[in-house]
Amino acid sequence: MTSRIHEKIEEIEEYVADLEEIKTDSFEEYLENKEKKAACERYAEKIIEAAVDLAFLVVSEKNLKTPMDDLSSFSALADENTISLELSTRLRQAKGMRNIIAHEYGKVDDKIVFEAIKEELINDVNLFIGSIKRALGGSKDNK
């Protein structure tokens, strides 16, 4: 595993730890505390963007065909069995959610974002990192 991939994994793990510290289990608290809501949404954006970056780094490391766009990066890794098709689909959906949050396409559904942060994003990103580590080896010195 290259040092850049290792650094990107550490970056994601740090964002996930920060999100774990600030997220709430209560949707009502999430809505009422605008600072906490904004911080959770921002960490979700950062985690998803870093996961896309990691996907592209792994595609490059494995000398796969460069994906046409961010969503295709997850598909390329699923096609090559680095991650499961199911995980690829969930990460592509997370990227879509990130775009809605970041660019405010239409009205953001706070309930969906809250549930995704609370129930899905952290688990999926941890599965993604675990899959990458298994595929490339856990040490940053492995190449």
Image (cartoon, helix red, strand yellow):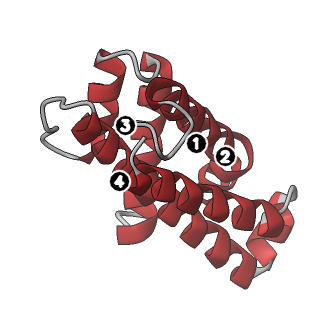
> Is label 4 in a helix, a strand or a loop?
helix
Q: CA distance from mark 2 to mark 3?
A: 27 Å
Q: Label 3: how many residues lie within 10 Å, few (<14), some (14-19) or many (20+)?
A: few
> Is label 1 in a helix, a strand or a loop?
helix
Q: Is residue 4 visible?
A: yes
Q: Are marks 1 and 2 in contact (CB under 8 Å)?
A: yes
Q: Label 4: how many residues lie within 10 Å, few (<14), some (14-19) or many (20+)?
A: some
Q: Earlier in the sequence, mark 2 or mark 4?
A: 4
Q: Which residue is mark 2?
A: 122
Residue 116: where, in percent of width, then height?
Answer: 63, 46
Q: Which residue is mark 1?
A: 125
Which residue is nearer to you in this view: 126 or 97?
Answer: 126
Q: Are marks 2 and 4 in contact (CB under 8 Å)?
A: no
Q: Label 1: how many residues lie within 10 Å, few (<14), some (14-19) or many (20+)?
A: many
Q: Earlier in the sequence, mark 2 or mark 3?
A: 2
Q: Which residue appears at 78% of the width and 63% of the height?
A: 23
Amino acid type of the residue tagged 4 in the rendering: Asp
Q: CA distance from mark 1 to mark 2?
A: 5 Å
Q: Is residue 18 left or right of residue 79?
A: right
Q: In the picture shown, does residue 130 fall above or below 38?
A: above
Q: CA distance from mark 2 to mark 4?
A: 17 Å
Residue 143 numbered tag: 3
Amino acid type of the residue tagged 2 in the rendering: Ile
Q: Which residue is mark 4?
A: 53
Name the quadrant containing residue 49. Answer: bottom left
Q: Which residue appears at 54% of the width and 25% of the height?
A: 134
